[in-house]
Image (tube, rainbow, N blue to C red):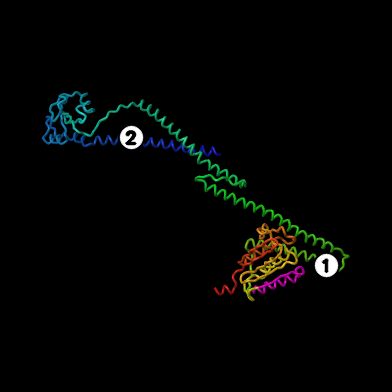
């Protein structure tokens, strides 16, 4: 994978270099052609060329130059020689001393191509009827160059040096592409490898390299850490779920076995009426226990999906909590319990669902009594927007406290394991459904405090 990424990057760089070479070559050839055409156009339409061509108007059929023509020659700093058809000079004006008196065709070509008189004079050729004339302009800025081009040698030169340049460019591009490709694709390969580790649930942090990709690797490490935490939580949840399913299955099998056993006993015709009544009461009790278990399962699912219908009623929380404490003390298992009740006001009004709120408060109150020694002291305090239930019992370990509101969880210090493992989670969800919140603080061997925060009281809402 690593070398594949480097090869792809290298191929891209070389392709770009080849394209650039061809484009530059095309542009260079185009510029040369354009320059030659432009030079040709400029040369053929230059002022000096136009002057020579237009000078025929100052020459008559006998080879004489008009005065106006002589003035034009003087202004242009030029001289003229007029020739007949045989190349014999028939007239001359301002011509240099070394000018010929007769020009052969080859001499005319020589004079036109090269500066035969001096390096500062350019000679032009013109004609009118049977008279030809040479005009030399001193101080001319026009220079003529003669180039001899061999097609075969030119192609050989271009092929030789062109291939050399292309080869050198490709070599440089390959070297640079390999260096940059290695520097760029190495972190990319590391990222791909890191993502594959995440896919395979390998959450080992790696060293973060410096450079452009540093934030990417930092984010990948953060994602890996979060996934590791979620993976651990998921495993713990699966373990608790399996334990809960096992407990619920056991809780369901126990009353079912009891119901089945006593139902079989009822078929015995030798039973007395008293025994039949006792067996029927046991069957009824076990069926009610199963009904409570199924109700808890149904309620926790509705709470999880926020589908709990509340029937809110305006209630005096002081009287409401006092009744719960009295009902608790009237239960046979709690008749010896020590529960202190206090309130900072006689009337504290709240809108609550009586059935569900009663269940939530009783859960926290009964937990304080159930999971502690019989002589535990429990104190219940009702304030404007809170209900505080505290005890001086065994307390809860830090590990159990972090899972206290999780469904299916039972603490390690729980001696009695009857129930569904949903009570605390259901109680918390009921409080939150009323718009409140619950916090539990505890210290081992010092006790536990449950703080139920409710929405503002009705009196406070009216004052606002």
Nearest to the observer: residue 362 or residue 205: 205
> Dots 1 and 2: beta carbons under 8 Å?
no
Whether residue 224 is situated above or below residue 139 in the rendered picture = below
In terms of secondary structure, where does tag 2 sit? helix
Point out the residue furthest to the front here.
446
User: Where is mark 2, residue-wise?
Assistant: 32
Q: Is residue 124 visible?
A: no
Quadrant for residue 54, please give it: top left
Nearest to the observer: residue 270 or residue 206: 206
Name the residue located 71 percent from the left edge and 55 percent from the top edge.
243
Q: Position of residue 462 (x, y in %)?
A: 56, 74
Whether residue 345 is situated above or below residue 104 in the rendered picture = below
Q: Residues within 10 Å of mark 2 (few under 14, many from 20)?
A: few
Quarter of the image with the N terminus in it: top right
Name the residue located 41 percent from the left edge and 37 percent from the top edge.
20
How far apart in space, not on screen, are marks 1 and 2 (Cα)?
118 Å
Q: Position of residue 279 (x, y in %)?
A: 82, 65
Q: Position of residue 14 (x, y in %)?
A: 46, 36
Nearest to the observer: residue 35 or residue 187: 187
Whether residue 204 is situated above or below residue 426 in the rendered picture = above
Quadrant for residue 147, please give it: top left
Q: Position of residue 384 (x, y in %)?
A: 61, 72
User: Where is mark 1, residue-wise?
Assistant: 278
Quarter of the image with the C terminus in it: bottom right
Q: Which mark is residue 323?
A: none
Quadrant for residue 25, please give it: top left
Q: Which residues are magenta?
A: 315-342
- In screen coordinates, is 252 left or right of 435? right
Name the residue located 53 percent from the left edge and 43 percent from the top edge.
187
In terms of secondary structure, where does tag 1 sit? helix
Point out the residue furthest to the left here.
67
């Amino acid at each position: 994978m690593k070398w594949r990424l480097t090869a792809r990057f290298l191929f891209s760089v070389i392709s770009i270099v080849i394209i650039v070479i061809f484009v530059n070559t095309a542009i260079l050839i185009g510029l040369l052609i354009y320059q030659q055409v432009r030079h040709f156009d400029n040369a053929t339409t230059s002022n000096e060329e136009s002057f020579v061509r237009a000078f025929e108007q100052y020459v008559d059929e006998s080879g004489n130059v008009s005065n106006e023509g002589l003035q034009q020659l003087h202004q242009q700093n030029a001289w003229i020689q007029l020739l007949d058809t045989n190349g014999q000079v028939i007239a001359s004006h301002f011509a240099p001393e070394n000018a010929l008196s007769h020009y052969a065709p080859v001499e005319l070509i020589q004079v036109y191509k090269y500066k035969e008189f001096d390096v500062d004079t350019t000679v032009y050729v013109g004609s009118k009827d049977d008279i030809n004339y040479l005009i030399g302009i001193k101080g001319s800025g026009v220079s003529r160059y003669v180039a001899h081009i061999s097609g075969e040698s030119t192609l050989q030169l271009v092929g030789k040096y062109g291939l050399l340049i292309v080869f050198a460019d490709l070599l440089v591009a390959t070297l640079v592409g390999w260096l940059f490709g290695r520097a760029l694709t190495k972190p990319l390969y590391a990222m791909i490898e890191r993502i594959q580790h995440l896919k395979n649930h390998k959450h080992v942090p790696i060293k973060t390299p410096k450079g452009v990709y540093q934030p990417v690797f930092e984010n990948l490490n953060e994602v890996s850490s979060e996934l590791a935490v979620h993976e651990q939580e998921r495993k713990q949840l699966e373990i608790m779920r399996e334990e809960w399913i096992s407990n619920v299955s056991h809780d369901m099998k126990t009353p079912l076995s009891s119901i089945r056993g006593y139902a079989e006993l009822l078929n015995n015709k030798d039973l007395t009426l008293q025994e039949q009544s006792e067996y029927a009461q046991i069957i009824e009790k076990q069926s009610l226990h199963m009904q409570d278990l199924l109700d808890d399962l149904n309620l926790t699912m509705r709470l999880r999906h926020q589908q709990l219908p509340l029937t809110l009623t305006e209630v005096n929380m002081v009287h409401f909590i006092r009744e719960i404490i009295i009902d608790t003390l009237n239960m046979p298992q709690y008749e010896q319990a020590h529960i202190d009740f206090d309130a900072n006001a006689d009337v504290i009004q709240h809108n609550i669902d009586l059935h569900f709120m009663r269940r939530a408060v009783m859960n926290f109150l009964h937990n304080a009594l159930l999971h502690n020694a019989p002589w535990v002291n429990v104190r219940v305090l009702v304030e404007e927007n809170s209900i505080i239930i505290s005890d001086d019992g065994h307390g809860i370990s830090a590990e159990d406290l972090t899972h206290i509101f999780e469904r299916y969880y039972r603490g390690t210090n729980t001696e009695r394991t009857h129930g569904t493992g949903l009570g605390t989670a259901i109680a918390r969800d009921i409080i939150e459904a009323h718009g409140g919140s619950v916090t539990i603080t505890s210290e081992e061997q010092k006790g536990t405090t449950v703080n139920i925060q409710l929405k503002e009281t009705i009196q406070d809402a009216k004052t606002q």
